Image (cartoon, grey):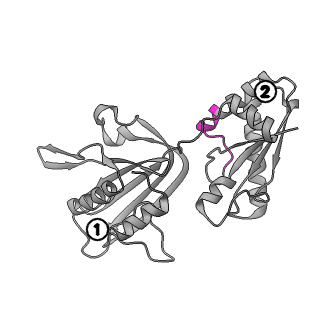
Amino acid sequence: MRLHRRSFLALLASAGLPGFARAAEGEMTDHPLLSGMSGFGLRSKTVRDADTFALEQVCGKLPSQALPWLVDGKVTRMEYRPQGKGSGPLAILRSYQQAIAKAGGQQLNTGFSLNDDGVQYKPHVFRLQVDKTPVVVVLHLDTSNYQLTIIEQQPLGELVTASKLAADLKAAGVATLHIEFETGKAQLPSAGQAMVKEIATLLRNAPELQLSIEGHTDRVGQAADNLRLSQERAEAVMKAVVAQGIEAKRLKAVGHGQNEPVADNRTEEGRARNRRVELVKR
């Protein structure tokens, strides 16, 4: 079962599952895919737009190689603590199991083990798909608190290849890359290195081709900061292409900031489309 993000959120809000409630307006907010249990408050939240989660290091070996040891993507970590009576670990687990199962997800491990001291809680690992995005959910229970980690893996889309870039440039004079830079930073993520190699292959196959590498952002933040960031990201891609043996004189880096959107900046989907790097034929 595949659900758009808004559909998934609506499902959780309307499913009638015991204990689920949205965060109040103006407070630290839950993740849009899964809300916290009622009776618990969100005490901390960290978000990294491009990170690697060492799954088996935290959760132990999963059955049948269900997931790789390292999972890449946007990683959101949240800690919930009881406010008032709260609920016990099993009640928390059952509610999340029901919500994720109703969304078409599945649990990949038991999350419990027995030792001389009784039950030992280990993280429960779930996998589901929201629209085209594979999502891994890790629920770490304790006697009173619990932690929720959500890894949104790279969306399944058309593979970036040198031939695809060449076709786009021939058809429109521009080819678009969506490189998941970390928020506010210009360091090229590991996932972007594969795209860089395809750009280098494109340029080797077409020795006369010259490209302008142009960075774009959404409109979150200050316009001047976005302009600087887009320039730095374009330069990071250019430097990586040059490191592949391409002559620097065939390239130039340009930053446009938030000035040339291609989608609605009022929506998450639109902002994601606007955060892009374009290859423009010179």
* Relative side of 254 to 7, left or right: right
Q: Let me know if residue 151 appears in the view.
A: yes
- Residue at position x 36%, y 64% from top? 80
Report the front residue among 97 and 81: 97
Residue carrying label 1 = 17
Report the front residue among 153 and 3: 3
C-alpha separation, residue under disc 2 versus residue under disc 1: 55 Å
* Relative side of 23 to 204, left or right: left
Task: Look at the image and give the residue range highlighted in magenta.
Answer: 185-194
**Residue type at tag 1:** Leu
State which quadrant residue 38 falls in: bottom left
Secondary structure under tag 2 reads helix
Q: Position of residue 253 (x, y in %)?
A: 82, 42
Q: Position of residue 231 (x, y in %)?
A: 78, 48
- Residue at position x 11%, y 44% from top? 116
Crowding around mark 1 (Cα neighbors within 10 Å: few <14, some 14 to 19, many 20+) is some
Q: Earlier in the sequence, mark 2 or mark 1?
A: 1
Secondary structure under tag 1 reads loop
State which quadrant residue 209 falls in: top right
Q: Position of residue 162 (x, y in %)?
A: 70, 29
Residue carrying label 2 = 203
Crowding around mark 2 (Cα neighbors within 10 Å: few <14, some 14 to 19, many 20+) is many
Report the front residue among 196 and 13: 13
Q: Is residue 75 above or below residue 243?
A: below
Report the front residue among 97 and 76: 97
